[in-house]
Amino acid sequence: MKKLLTAAIFCALSFILYAPSLAFSQPEVIQPEGSLFCTDFEIKYSQTSETQTPLTPTPTGTVQGITSNVEEVAGNLRLEAENLPDFSQADKNFLLALERLLPADLKKNLSIDQTPLKTKTAHYVVGKDSEGKQTQAEKIPETEITLPSWWTSILGRSKVLCGLFNTCPPPKSLAIKVGQQNLTSPPQNTGCLLTGNLPKTEAVENLSSIKEEFKTTSLWQKITEIIDDLINWIRRTVTKEETKLENKTRGSLVGGETFNQQSSFIDSFLPQGLILADKNAPLVGQAGYKINVEGKDVPGGDQLYYQNLGKARARYCLQLCSLYPGGTNISAIDPLCPSCDPKDYPLENFEDSLLDKSLCQKNPDGSCDYFQPGDSPRCDGDPICESGKCYPLMWRQANDYTSVGCPVPYSATNCNDPSVCRKMTFSKNPAGGYGGCQYSNPNVCVRTDRNAVGSCAALCNWACCAYQQ
């Protein structure tokens, strides 16, 4: 504890040295990096019709036939309710920590923006073709989501705290604003880990449907049963048509990955055995859908999985436990926290999201290099080849593109900016390579919109991250 207090005092003194610049500088704007929230669920649609005709003198008995055909199917889907894992009490605790740690002359300059952030999610309704492969969604329902103001606040406060404890670059100002990004929804092939803890959640009050109609193709099965009723001397023809669709909700939680990074300051207060290393897990929030297929209401899913928020909750809750006597019901202090037993915070999957690996070029050791097949051989020392080719998912120095006549595929002017490209270190994957994407190197320079792109190949030229510590 003495070491922690000494560290806190040292960091506070460091802030004092920067007091003039912090006091009079312009507000710092955080460009938030999103994390994935998602779910998959099956939609079953069927309809039955029956006709009756008089029997002829020579009844044929019972006949059954099954035919299948891929046809268009349309309907409407709307996200009616969404609950976000409730970190609002953590936000209040972060404020209390700042009020205790910051000197008075700095505290008066503390200003954290609480303007609600917006994001959107797409609902990809897909079927299957005659070969069992998923079809592409043609018309895609979308929902605009306005997040609670405490979510904006916790991004700003955790930025100051992680700077205070030297686990991220210190803020340039104590007036923190969070930039509003026009995040695109991740594509339908983005992986979704459908397991996790269900913590206390808070309803997102503002959901606005941008589009509700969907259209796709799907394999329809038509079952016809002809039954001869000899008592009533009639023939009944019963026809049942059924198809199975799947919804893939894919959205980006604005600042989700930023919060994961900035909450690392809590590790300063945890015993070495509780520092959570390279594992993570989703947190589950409730959701409500209204779905109509071909004019008929059908049931939908009731959960959303917020990828990679499990580690942030475990950090926060276990540190909160250390502030109270043994035996305290920590759930009464903050319902987000189930207990003070680390076993109640299982972290099983790799910290990186389950993204599309279709561009993976397998190496003999099971690791992946990501480049367009046929464009170039593997380049040693980099997870994606850099041989003057045009890589549409890769961020590079602008002149790397223009010098070989390739169009610059992104609007950022400087990929050295950590808000554009970020250095990651992934753990060894038992199946080969590193992390969930099985990169061929543990250190990978990734695009910060990698989750929104939904592909493991959304990387950066290593030079973009080479200077980052």
Image: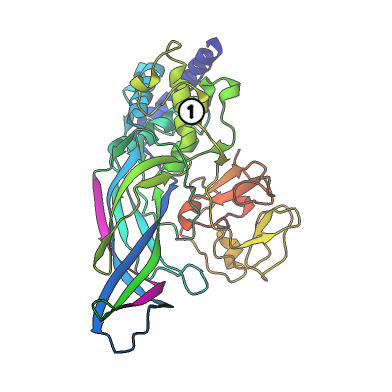
Residue 117 is situated, as x and y percent measured from the top left of the image, at 31, 45
Tag 1: amino acid: Asp
Q: Is residue 353 above or below residue 328?
A: below
Quarter occupied by the C terminus: top right
- Residue drawn 49% across and 15% down? 9
Residue 11 appears in the rendering: yes
Q: Secondary structure at mark 1?
A: helix
Horizontal side of residue 452 vs 43, given as left or right? right
Residue 25 appears in the rendering: no
Q: Main secondary structure of the magenta part?
A: strand
Q: Residue 220 in magenta?
A: yes
Q: Is residue 464 above or below residue 22?
A: below
Residue 73 is situated, as x and y percent measured from the top left of the image, at 34, 72
Q: Residue 306 in magenta?
A: no
Q: Residues within 10 Å of mark 1 (few under 14, many from 20)?
A: few
Residue 381 is situated, as x and y percent measured from the top left of the image, at 72, 52
Residue 393 is situated, as x and y percent measured from the top left of the image, at 54, 61
Residue positioned most to the right: 364
Q: Give the image quarter of residue 391.
A: bottom right
The residue closer to the viewer here, 296 or 420, is: 296
Location of mark 1 (residue) = 344
The residue closer to the viewer here, 428 or 110, is: 428
Please report the bounds of the magenta region as a residue range.
Answer: 206-228
